[in-house]
């Protein structure tokens, strides 16, 4: 192969390195090109993960020119092997395997090469060592000097192809993570798609959505006022989805859940060394929401010092990290929410009046569930479908009698409490019906009576209509499983076991029993 042919060959290899982002396809194509100049036994590409000190064969090409991805030869290097490999590959040498065994046995052993005539080259990029490539000629043959010279020039495109493959894998993992987060969010919101209509948008929330529609596409701050559990986050997400920022991020921050001494760092970020423990620069929530919307839930919990910095961002969009000196612009639409009486807090000096005027440019009052009686039936059906899916139960929708009970309840916990009641009713009904009365704390049967005896803290317990103690969802589930175990004398599997009675997989039942601290042995002794 003359100089001109080598140049054309390298040009084609670089084209393939840029065209194929999957390392197996690239290896197969290059091996086919090389085979015309040198009989091939195997071409292998190794990837080095320095963090985990793992060397992995990620591609292997045989004489049939078929790429074979490998994870079979993944091996964790010792610290000495990893350091030796990184040191050797950083010099990007091209050696025969026999010469490598003479100079560095640790590296040679890590690559698992069989032929002493094999060419071994280290792969490096501007970001460091990425791996190695091994070219084994046909048994009994040696690589010609021209082939060795050409192979040395192929190390850079091989390194580029390996980095492209790593980026593809990273993007794939990030996409899976994003999809999992999206599915988790949809499950939590009880939706099948992010663009699903909010329950009540054509009913009790019609006036709210008509008001919101006027400012969705503007960048005006929006202040949502409503009781706890009334659905402020759902409304905030809907505002974001209907706005021109729908392709940008939606970041939710619960201001009441952040320690006062960390609020500035969480919201506005910090510079490295700005305080003890600040070992690196950190972007705050405002920076992460750039180009999208930032939902400040429970904004009334912000301390006065943080309110001053928030006011500045609302005024001119300028931000300065904690410990920083430079100001920079952020493009964020702020949606705030609170259940507190902010005007009263202003009178007490606990909330800044100028911040109130900025946030309340366009206030939206979200009515409590007791003022949206027409939405209860639709919401109950919505949560019943969600409960059936979450708990693996047969779908049971509330009947006319159930809706009467739900309509007569005052719902101090609003939509959030209704969701919990439907979840509890579905579990207590075991997929056969919704036990709305029991879930509300009324009309307990003998088997469900112990639920009413559970003592919960004043903060979590709510009085039911007949002054029964309102159990948590875990407590209701625990009691229901215990009732099933009592009836089956501690038996879990089989046609007469608790799993069959509850219409649930035995493995799932055992997992829930472990989580809830339910012991089947205490019911075994009751067998007669």
Image (spheres, rainbow, N blue to C red):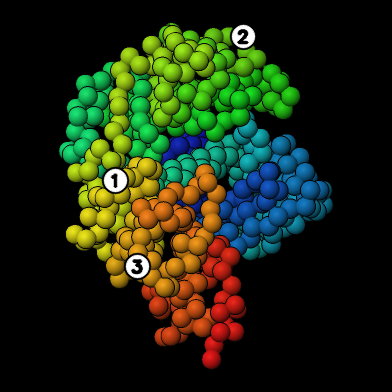
Q: Is residue 502 visible?
A: yes
In the figure, is residue 324 to the left or right of 235?
A: right
Q: Earlier in the sequence, mark 2 or mark 3?
A: 2
Determine the residue located farthest toward the bottom in the rendered image. Answer: 528
Q: Compare residues 377 and 243 and report the one nearer the observer.
A: 377
Name the spot of residue 267 as percent of width and height, x first: 53, 23
Q: Earlier in the sequence, mark 1 or mark 2?
A: 1
Name the spot of residue 264 as percent of width and height, x first: 58, 21
Question: Which mark's residue is nearer the viewer, 1 or 3?
Answer: 3
SS class, disc 1 = loop
SS class, disc 2 = loop
Question: Which mark's residue is nearer the viewer, 2 or 3?
Answer: 3
Name the spot of residue 124 as percent of width and height, x first: 64, 37
Residue 426's place in the image compared with 503, above or below, is above
The residue pinned by badge 1 equals: 193
Q: Badge 2: how crowded within 10 Å, few (<14), some, or many (20+)? A: few
Q: Earlier in the sequence, mark 1 or mark 3?
A: 1
Q: Badge 1: how crowded within 10 Å, few (<14), some, or many (20+)? A: few
Q: Compare residues 101 and 124 and report the one nearer the observer.
A: 124
- Res 442 quadrant in image: bottom left
Q: Compare residues 46 and 523 and report the one nearer the observer.
A: 523
SS class, disc 3 = helix
The residue pinned by badge 3 equals: 429
Q: Please tell me which residue is depicted at 50% across the width and 62% down the height of the picture.
A: 453
Count of marks placed on residues: 3
Q: Please tell me which residue is depicted at 64% across the width and 19% down the height of the picture.
A: 271
Q: Compare residues 519 and 148 and report the one nearer the observer.
A: 519
Q: For the residues marked 1 and 3, what is the alpha-carbon distance in whole angstroms?
A: 28 Å
The residue pinned by badge 2 equals: 325
């Amino acid at each position: 192969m003359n100089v001109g042919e080598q140049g054309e060959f390298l040009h084609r290899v670089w084209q393939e390195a840029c065209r194929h982002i999957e390392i197996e396809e690239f290896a197969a194509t290059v091996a086919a090109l090389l085979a015309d100049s040198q009989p091939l036994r195997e071409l292998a590409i190794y990837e080095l993960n320095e963090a985990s000190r793992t060397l992995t064969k990620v591609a292997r090409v045989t004489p049939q020119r078929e790429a074979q991805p490998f994870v079979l030869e993944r091996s964790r290097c010792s610290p000495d092997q990893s350091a030796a490999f990184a040191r050797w590959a950083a010099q990007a040498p091209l050696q025969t395997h026999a010469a490598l065994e003479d100079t560095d046995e640790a590296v040679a052993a890590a690559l698992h090469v069989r032929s002493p005539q094999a060419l071994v080259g280290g792969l490096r990029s501007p970001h460091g060592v990425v791996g190695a490539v091994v070219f084994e000629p046909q048994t009994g043959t040696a690589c010609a000097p021209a082939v060795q010279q050409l192979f040395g020039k192929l190390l850079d495109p091989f390194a580029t192809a390996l980095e492209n493959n790593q980026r593809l894998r990273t993007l794939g993992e990030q996409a899976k993570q994003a999809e999992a987060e999206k599915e988790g969010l949809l499950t939590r919101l009880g939706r099948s798609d992010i663009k699903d209509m909010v329950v009540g948008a054509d009913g009790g929330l019609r006036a709210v959505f008509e008001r919101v529609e006027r400012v969705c596409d503007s960048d005006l701050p929006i202040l949502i006022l409503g009781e706890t559990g009334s659905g402020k986050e759902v409304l905030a997400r809907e505002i974001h989805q209907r706005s021109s920022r729908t392709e940008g991020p939606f970041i939710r921050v619960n201001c009441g859940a952040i320690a006062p001494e960390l609020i500035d760092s969480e919201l506005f970020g910090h510079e490295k060394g700005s305080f003890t423990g600040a070992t690196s620069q950190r972007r705050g929530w405002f920076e992460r929401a750039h180009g999208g919307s930032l939902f400040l839930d429970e904004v009334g919990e912000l301390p006065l010092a943080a309110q001053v910095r928030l006011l500045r961002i609302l005024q001119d969009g300028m931000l300065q990290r904690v410990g920083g000196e430079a100001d920079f612009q952020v493009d964020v639409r702020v949606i705030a929410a609170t259940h507190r009486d902010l005007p009263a807090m202003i009178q007490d000096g606990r909330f800044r009046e100028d911040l109130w005027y900025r946030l309340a440019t366009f206030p939206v009052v979200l009515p409590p569930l007791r003022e949206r009686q027409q939405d209860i039936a639709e919401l109950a059906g919505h949560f019943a479908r969600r409960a059936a899916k979450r708990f693996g139960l047969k779908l049971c929708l509330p009947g006319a009698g159930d809706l009467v009970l739900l309509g007569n309840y005052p719902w101090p916990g609003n939509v959030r409490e209704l969701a919990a009641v439907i979840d509890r009713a579905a579990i207590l009904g075991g997929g056969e019906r919704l036990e709305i009365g029991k879930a509300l704390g009324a009309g307990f049967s003998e088997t469900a009576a112990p639920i009413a005896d559970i003592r919960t803290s004043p903060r979590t317990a709510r009085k039911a209509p007949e002054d029964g103690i309102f159990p948590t969802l875990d407590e209701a589930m625990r009691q229901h499983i215990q009732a099933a175990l009592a009836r089956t004398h501690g038996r879990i599997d089989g046609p007469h076991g608790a799993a069959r009675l509850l219409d649930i997989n035995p493995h799932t039942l055992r997992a829930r029993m472990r989580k809830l601290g339910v012991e089947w042995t205490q019911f075994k002794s009751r067998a007669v």
